[in-house]
Image (cartoon, rainbow, N blue to C red):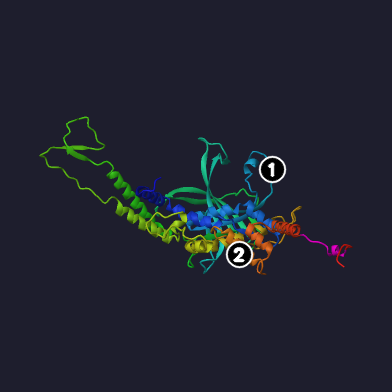
Amino acid sequence: MKDTPHAKQLAKLYIAVNLADLLLTKPADLLVGEPPSYETGLPDDSIEQKRLSSIVEENDLNQLLHEMTIANGYRGDAALKVYYAYRNDFSELETIGLPKPDDVKPEPIIESVDPSQVFPELSRGSKKRFKAINIAWIETVETKAGVIQSFTTGSDTKKEYFLNVERHLPGVIVYKRYKVESKGVDTTYGVPIPTYTIGEEVDTGRESNLVMTGVSDFLVRLVPYKSVDERWQGISGIEKMESLLAAINDRLVQIDYILWKHSDPTAYGPDLGEDETRFSGRYIPVGKEEQTPGYMTWNSQLDGAFKELDYLLGLVYQKSETPQWLFGTTISQDKGGTGTSHTDSGAIKARFMPIISKVKRIRNHLDKAVRDCLYFAQVIENYANEGVEGFVSYEPVYPTIHWKDGIPRDEKELAEIMQIRTNKPTLDVQSAIKKLDEVNDMQAKTIIERIDADETRVNGTVDASIFNTDGGAK
């Protein structure tokens, strides 16, 4: 599209419509766009580090954190749950009488839970500590003569509703299931909320309704987007911008109405005397001696509307702690430049400071929750496989997460820093190679061995005995 005033105005409209999604996606990109490293502090070939890396990879943890951070920005809260089970659901195989595949085994699973289904119970006198965490959700099933059906539907089937409750206590999970009746929809708060009447308790269908976890803590971790000390609930990323976003939407509707209203104006002029003459709109013939009819028109050319839209967009970026040029360029007049005036990483970091501070705040909540979940996953894996033949037990290690800031790295600058630091005791060559090339300990050792081999081959070494031959100096 050609860079014209009209094109810039269209860009403003597009950005305004997609603004909330852009502002909430960017922190997630900076948080895990460059994957963090998960370390136990032990060698890479140790069983503890191998199991930690395996849990991270098998649960696709980085993708999970990216999705959760975006959703957390809308809702204000997120929840992570750890449990030990099969990765896939084999219940339908059992329904038709087929066994589970022989090569599958239970494993520690970390997954996100819809926070609207999480109901903590506060400890007495506290607004942050919990005595129990309940996960409850309504399940709708098709039944035929009281038997749950997988595929069959028809006049003889009906929908039944059940309330599933997963009550988490330190070291214990209690499962319960209740039959409920639909009570209609409550719109008291401006949104449709289905309501139900809880009935009698029914069988859960599980082998045991009381499960010991082996972890002396809750296997559910709540992650607020932004928090205050007076409540456990989080604050969303758009909660403080709702009025501005509503104003932007109102302005867009008004601009659209003005453009539509004046897109097909009525024309007037001399009587052409031709019935077949057609204009885009109505045409009023006016004689020489007749008074020209007039019409009150608005001649602002939309400049005022787009100027107000500029201010509203600028305020939204300011409240979201996000520089406009973070998206590549700016669409408003004099709102912080393009962000391309600096090339070294230090200057770029300085300009990124608002969004980096925001990401660090999000990371503070996420870091503790993720490390807890990774530690719990190791504990329940050892607890569930205690005495199982073929399982090699290990000591669970509370991990450390090395987060990246998401800022593009200057490879030359980093290499120069590494070269300086390797001459000092603060950093060894192996760690420098590991950090620079993002490799593990084994790969770093291999690279060092190759470097030493190259130096030996180029410089060469000789035995001093060659000077003691008969042809030597006397």
| 264, above or below 49, in the image | above
Could you say where residue 147 lies in the image, as x and y percent from the top left? 58, 41
Q: Nearer the viewer, residue 457 or 28?
A: 457
- Residue 447 position within the rendered picture, expressed as x and y whole percent measured from the top left: 70, 57
- In percent of width and height, residue 102 lies at 71, 44
| Callout 2 amino acid | Ile
- Of all residues, the one furthest to the left in this rendering is 289
Q: Residue at x 51, y 63 (%)?
A: 349
Q: Which residue is mark 1?
A: 101
Is label 1 in contact with label 2 (beta carbons under 8 Å)? no
Say which quarter of the image contains residue 449: bottom right
Q: Which mark is residue 69?
A: none
Q: Is residue 464 magenta?
A: yes
Region rendered in magenta = 460-468
Left or right: 203 in relation to 272: right
Quadrant occupied by the N terminus = top left
Residue 417 is marked as: 2
Answer whether residue 138 is magenta in the image.
Answer: no
Residue at horizontal 50%, vertical 54%? Answer: 70
Figure quadrant of the C terminus: bottom right
Nearer to me, 139 or 351:
351
Of tags 1 and 2, the one toward the viewer is: 2
Give the SS element for disc 2: helix
Distance from Cα at disc 1 to Cα at disc 2:
52 Å
Does 113 sit left or right of 280 as displayed?
right
